[in-house]
Image: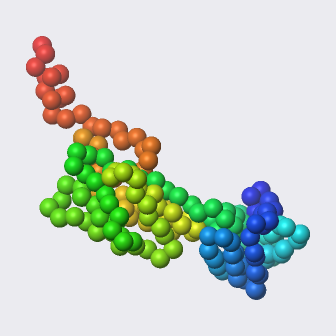
Amino acid sequence: MSKIGEMPISIESVEIKIDDNQVEVKGSEGVLTLTLSKEISVEKKDQQLILKRLSKEKKAKALHGLYRALIQNAVLGVVKPWEKRLEVVGTGYKVKLQGEDLIFEVGFSHPVIFKSVPGIKFSVEGSNKIAVKGCDKQIVGQVAQKIREIKDPDPYKGKGLRYDGEKIKLKPGKKAKTVGVGAK
């Protein structure tokens, strides 16, 4: 029995519309629609959603917890948007917001332009902090990863784009190797 799938979802501050295997979640930040599998059913009781499996197959058991988590993330996201924070680290490295797009100067011969994504809002604090916000948790994570891939952190100096609070384990350079060799 799925422990997560059995837990009810509180829907006090959102509007839910259930139509066959489609669940539409509407809140102050936006609207998300999820298409459920045929093995899962959803019913609304009072101010809660309850998911049930229609079969005892292994696939249905796996999907039970998955869809419960996806609906819970949608309910939370339409009330308060999901957020990922990134930071730009390096001398001369900076980011700025131009309209809806992000402009990065991260050591290339040209500035890198990251186009806006529908449903995602960018904000820049100072010249080295970025916040990616949106109501869909999956898209927020994907966009944050695509931004990070513009300039992965350098393993020797740590320069580049990284998540806020991410620790980069730096490799020792050539000097560290030569110091041990000459000492006899």
Is residue 10 visible to the viewer in this orientation of the structure?
yes
Residue 90, percent from left and from top: 26, 46
| Quadrant of the rendered image containing residue 180 | top left
Residue 86, percent from left and from top: 41, 53
**In the image, farthest residue toward the top:** 184
Of residues 108 and 40, the one drawn nearer to the viewer in this rendering = 108
Identify which residue is drawn at 76% across, 76% down.
16
Of residues 39 and 49, the one drawn nearer to the viewer in this rendering = 49
* Image height of 124 relative to 44, above or below: above
Identify which residue is drawn at 44% across, 64% down.
122
**In the image, farthest residue toward the right:** 46
| Quadrant of the rendered image containing residue 169 | top left
Identify which residue is drawn at 57% across, 69% down.
136
The quadrant of the picture occupied by the C terminus is top left
Identify which residue is drawn at 49% across, 56% down.
84
Residue 81, percent from left and from top: 59, 63
Residue 120, percent from left and from top: 48, 70
**In the image, farthest residue toward the left:** 182
Looking at the image, what colour scheme do you see? rainbow
The quadrant of the picture occupied by the N terminus is bottom right
Of residues 24 and 133, the one drawn nearer to the viewer in this rendering = 133
* Image height of 174 relative to 20, above or below: above
* Image height of 171 relative to 88, above or below: above
* Image height of 41 relative to 104, above or below: below
Left or right of 109, for residue 24: right
Is residue 64 visible to the viewer in this orientation of the structure?
no
Left or right of 121, for residue 107: left
